[in-house]
Image (cartoon, helix red, strand yellow):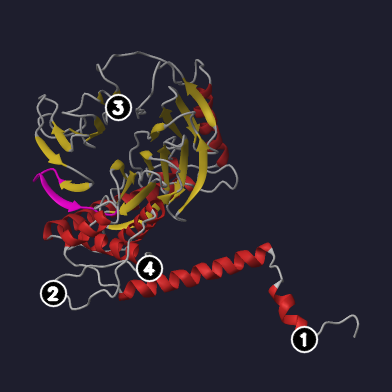
Amino acid sequence: DSNGISLEDLGEDMMNYELSDSSKKAREEHQAILDEFERKKRARTLAVPTDDGRVRAKLRELGEPQCLFGEGPGDRRDRLRYLLSKLEGAEIVPDEDEETESESEEEVHVQHIDEIVDSVRICKIKREEEFFTQGTLELLEARRWITRYSLPRARDRLRKQRAEYDLPLPQIKSVRKDLFTGLKVRAVNYSSYANFSSQIGDDRPISQCVFSPDCSLIATGSWSGHADRIGGVAWHPQSTLSIDKSVVNLASGAADGLINLWSLESDSPLGTFDYSWRLWDIETTGELLLQEGHFKEVYAIRFQNDGALVATGYLIIGLDAIGRVWDLRTGRSAMVLEGHVKDILEYSRYLYVFAAFGQINNSLSVSYQVATGSADNTIRIWDIRTLRCTYTIAAHKSLVSDVRFFHASLAFISEEDARGIKPTVSGLYLASCGYDGFVNIWSADDWSLLKILAGHDGKVMAVDISS
C-alpha cells in the first residue's frame, strides 16, 4: 500500500517518536519511584557502624551535621544509613566486632541541601510515632482525682445548658442586643469599654496581665522576669475568694525555666518548679507528669473550666505551628490543632458555663470551642467535637499575642429553679491584642469586629477581661 509503512521502517520511526510532556512527566515519576525502591533495597544491605562515635565521625566525613536537634543515637545511625544509601559505592566502616565488610571504596560526593532536608523529614516522621511512658502511682491517683473533680462539674454545666436551651428566643436576642450595643457605643444605659486608667508597670515590656477571681486585683508579669522574661501568670481559682493569703495564690512562669508559687503576703516565692509542660501537685511540690508530645518549646497552656482538658501550643521553625488538646484523665492527646502558618502564642479555652445561639440555625454552641492566636496575624476557632477549624478571623495587622473569652461570674442554677434562669452573657464575645498596638473586641456569634480599643504606643502583649 502506497499510503502504508513497511515493517522494516517501523523500528526506525519508533526511535524518532517524541513523547508528550505529560508522558515524560509520568515516566520521570515512575523512574523516581524505581530509584527510591532501589535506594531502600540498597539501604537494607548496608553495614553501618553501631558505635555512636564512629557514626559521628562518618557524618563529619560526609560533611553532614554530627547531630540534629532532638536526635538520639538511633536516629543518627538511621540518618547515616539514609545518606549512604543515596551515594552509590560509598565506603561504610563497620565496628570491629562486625563480620560484614564493604566491597568497594570510592570517593564520596555529598549533596548538602537535599540530604539535610530529607534527613530532617525522616527524623520528624520517626518522632511522630506514638509511644507510652510508665506512670507512677501518684499520677494514677491524680488522674482519678481529676476524673472525680471534672465529671460533676461537666454534669452541672450540661444541666444549666439544657435549661438555657428552653429560653424564649426573643429574650435571648434582647440580652445579646443590649450587650453588643454597649460594646459598640457608649450610652447612659449600657456598659462599655473605654480608657479608664494607665499605669506604668515596669521598666521592661509587660508580657502578662490577669485579673484575680474577684476582680479586685490584677497581676502582671514583665520581661524583667524572675531572672528572665515572664511568659505566664495564673491565679488560683479560689484566690481572693476563699483561700488564705498566706498559701499559694498565684503562679508565674518565665524563660529561666522556673515556675514560682506566690502568696499575697510575701515578695518571695513559696515554691519553685522547673521546665517544660508538666503536671504538678502544689500541695506536695511533686511532679506528677512530664507530658511529651511536642517537638519544640511550649509557649501557651490553658485549662478547660471543668478541669478535664488542657490545651498547649508550640512552634516549629519553618513548619506549621501545632497545638494540642490533652485529656488529663487519660494522658492522651484528644485533638491536634494544625492550621496556623506561624507560631501559636496564646490560647483561650472557651469551655465555660454559658449558652451561645448561632445566628444561622439557633443551635446551642457551648463548651466545645478553642480559640488560638498566632504570629500569622489570625485567630482560629476550633470545634473539639468535629476536630477541625470552623472559622479564621483576620484579627490584626501584626502578631496576635493574646486571646481571651469573656467569662461572667455565674452561680449554678439547679433544675428546681431553672425555669427562672436568665440568659448568660458569658462567652458571647472575646478580646484579642496584637503587636499592631490595638485591642479588638469580637462577637462570638459571627466573629465580627465589635470595637477597637486604641491607646497603646507600642506592642500589646497581653489582655484580660474582668468578670
Q: Which residue is mark 1?
A: 7
Q: Mark 4 is on which residue type?
A: Glu
Q: Is residue 410 above or below residue 138?
A: above
Q: Amino acid at mark 1?
A: Leu
Label 3 crowd bin: few (<14), some (14–19), many (20+), radius 10 Å: many
Residue depth check, mark 2 versus mark 3: number of the one nearer the observer: 2
Distance Cα–Cα, label 3 vs label 4: 54 Å
Marks 3 and 1 sit apart, C-alpha to C-alpha, by: 83 Å
Magenta highlight on residue 436: no
Query: Which residue is under mark 4?
Result: 88
Helix, strand or loop at label 2? It is loop
Say how many tags the image has: 4
Q: CA distance from mark 2 to mark 3?
A: 57 Å
In the picture, the disc for residue 207 is 3
**Label 3 with label 4: CB-CB less than 8 Å:** no
Tell me which numbered mark, 2 or 1, is placed earlier along the sequence: 1
Q: Nearer the viewer, mark 2 or mark 1?
A: 1
